Image (spheres, rainbow, N blue to C red):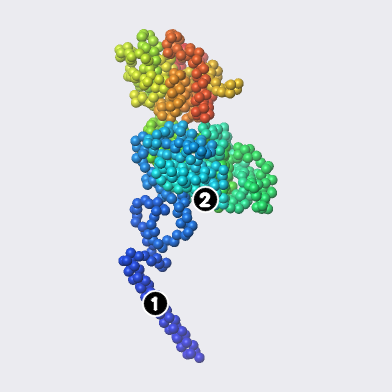
Amino acid sequence: MQAKKRYFILLSAGSCLALLFYFGGLQFRASRSHSRREEHSGRNGLHHPSPDHFWPRFPDALRPFVPWDQLENEDSSVHISPRQKRDANSSIYKGKKCRMESCFDFTLCKKNGFKVYVYPQQKGEKIAESYQNILAAIEGSRFYTSDPSQACLFVLSLDTLDRDQLSPQYVHNLRSKVQSLHLWNNGRNHLIFNLYSGTWPDYTEDVGFDIGQAMLAKASISTENFRPNFDVSIPLFSKDHPRTGGERGFLKFNTIPPLRKYMLVFKGKRYLTGIGSDTRNALYHVHNGEDVVLLTTCKHGKDWQKHKDSRCDRDNTEYEKYDYREMLHNATFCLVPRGRRLGSFRFLEALQAACVPVMLSNGWELPFSEVINWNQAAVIGDERLLLQIPSTIRSIHQDKILALRQQTQFLWEAYFSSVEKIVLTTLEIIQDRIFKHISRNSLIWNKHPGGLFVLPQYSSYLGDFPYYYANLGLKPPSKFTAVIHAVTPLVSQSQPVLKLLVAAAKSQYCAQIIVLWNCDKPLPAKHRWPATAVPVIVIEGESKVMSSRFLPYDNIVTDAVLSLDEDTVLSTTEVDFAFTVWQSFPERIVGYPARSHFWDNSKERWGYTSKWTNDYSMVLTGAAIYHKYYHYLYTHYLPASLKNMVDQLANCEDILMNFLVSAVTKLPPIKVTQKKQYKETMMGQTSRASRWADPDHFAQRQSCMNTFASWFGYMPLIHSQMRLDPVLFKDQVSILRKKYRDIERL
């Protein structure tokens, strides 16, 4: 019996081996036969895909750019579904590989620099207010040109902001309208602004027409569809977002510790079904009703009652108990979950309120992410880890929270508080890509005063700007250049301008003196000017206009500028003291004559006053020290309309400079030692310098204040009650103990 079992086992094993060799041999022969057929078909130019290829075929390392939709099927083994074929004609995928190097013509920017052309508005085309604000911001900027032959970048006048087909703002037949533009050129060197794309239920990022090789400045754009260093991610803003200026941030005091009533808040819609519903539906798990208040409501839309779930009534009741503004202003962190689209209005609202945004929108390319380091101003969360959010934010140290809140205020005021700032930031980012050799670095974009006020055309070295001395470990400049604005002929050696020149030249900090000759008479001979220990350079003013005193002259070799009117009365001691004060505040205007502004309720306009009070907001440039970068900013940043107004009135240039510097620094100027007389009283009343006695002079300055405030979009001037005097000033001690002794005698 045992022998039979052994024979049976051996017979079974032999049969198995025979079958194994038989089928293995067939497969081996089949594979060899298939290889020969494939080899033969390859010689005949054919290719039959095989699912059992073991090694993938890699394309060449370097290949010329071809748009996705124009690629030939080199490997027919890639199966393209009907939906993919339809998507191939969609603007989402066309030009997906576009980069500045492949889809942008840099030669258009070489001749005339970075100029932007806006297509003229076509008759009968409706344009939403938000898009009108965008176009107005471009047309009011220093980049705008009305000549398309000078343009480097083109912007459509067709409204592309809202591409949701269910929206009343949706523009129909945009595809054909765009293609008919004679400068379209397949979108090359074009910029398209978009806030909303796609529609219910998928809310895709398709803008509904072929954008070709155009760049997108788009809100709620995903990292998947975002083309790095080509597209620009912009924030989602409402139709009520101000066109210019905008409100300042709500952080008034740096309270320590920086904790508020609520740790984490949110109040918004809850979507019961469809895209964007998962995260908001789960917020109730984290809500504790105490310091974590996350409120949602499903009471929105026409058919909300048909779809409401068991939590809707309870959520709606809780939702009505809290005021959103009160929560926003009293919370340390604000949750910013995605909605139907990746972006949300909550993002800008949190920034302005100094409520640190906690982002819960996986795959969202954050606004201006190319230049802004959002880790310094926000907490980037993950929708899949919602339950860990409370413990994560509780672990953040108080000094870090304060730093985050301060950065939210800087970013809000620098880049997001108005449509104009959003548009200008977009254009500046594109300009930096084009002129990489002078582009701004991360420090400039993420530190006060920000990229919009630091023009890289001025210098590529941070030490040439007054804002980065501490970051670079540099000491403020030790010398200044005195610039004297002369408007009356030189007829006597006792004229105030000559006394002023001698007093400034005696300063130990004076490097040189420049006399800007804006007089109608010819330049005086060299021997008419007094001999000084420092060089005296006389420059004839360009066009003899007021704004010429703030031109960035190459002759100014120092960073510090002492600006003087010809009839100013200053001693050498006063000059020295003012300069030592400026060295501690190199980004501000420091000087003697102060003025102030106020709001006139009866006339509902801004007023200007020269009354002596303990309050001021301007220091006049007739006797003031500031950084020479402000000459460049005055000339190249401010619009020609404001400078032309100054030149026509021969007035208000000092007010405009104060507006500019306060808008940049968000700080008031600094007044030094009180002095009742800073103008020479012996000047003849018939001279141009006696314009202070002109009754129209004061009225003109009132008008200037309101015109300037209108252009800036807000009042940038800031009141101050600080006055800096020398140590022991007016103290009842020996005069020998005082450094600036002569000031007290004046």
The answer, for residue 347, to whether it is visible in the render is no
The image shows residue 323 at horizontal and vertical percentages of: 65, 39
The image shows residue 501 at horizontal and vertical percentages of: 37, 15
138 relative to 168, above or below? above
Secondary element type, mark 1: helix
534 relative to 234, above or below? above
Residue 464, located in which quarter of the rendered image?
top left
Q: Which mark is residue 451?
A: none
Is 47 left, or right, of 666 in this rendering? Answer: left
Residue 689, located in which quarter of the rendered image?
top left
Name the amino acid, label 2.
Answer: Thr
Question: Badge 1 local density, few (<14 within 10 Å), some, or many (20+)?
Answer: few
Q: Does label 1 or label 2 sit earlier along the sequence?
A: 1
50 relative to 719, above or below? below
The image shows residue 78 at horizontal and vertical percentages of: 42, 61
In whole angstroms, how far apart are the C-alphas of marks 1 and 2? Answer: 51 Å
The residue that appears at 37% across and 38% down in the rendered structure is 109
The answer, for residue 740, to whether it is visible in the render is yes
**Residue furthest to the bottom:** 1
Is 15 left, or right, of 271 in this rendering? Answer: left
Residue indicated by mark 2: 204
Is 197 left, or right, of 300 in this rendering? Answer: left
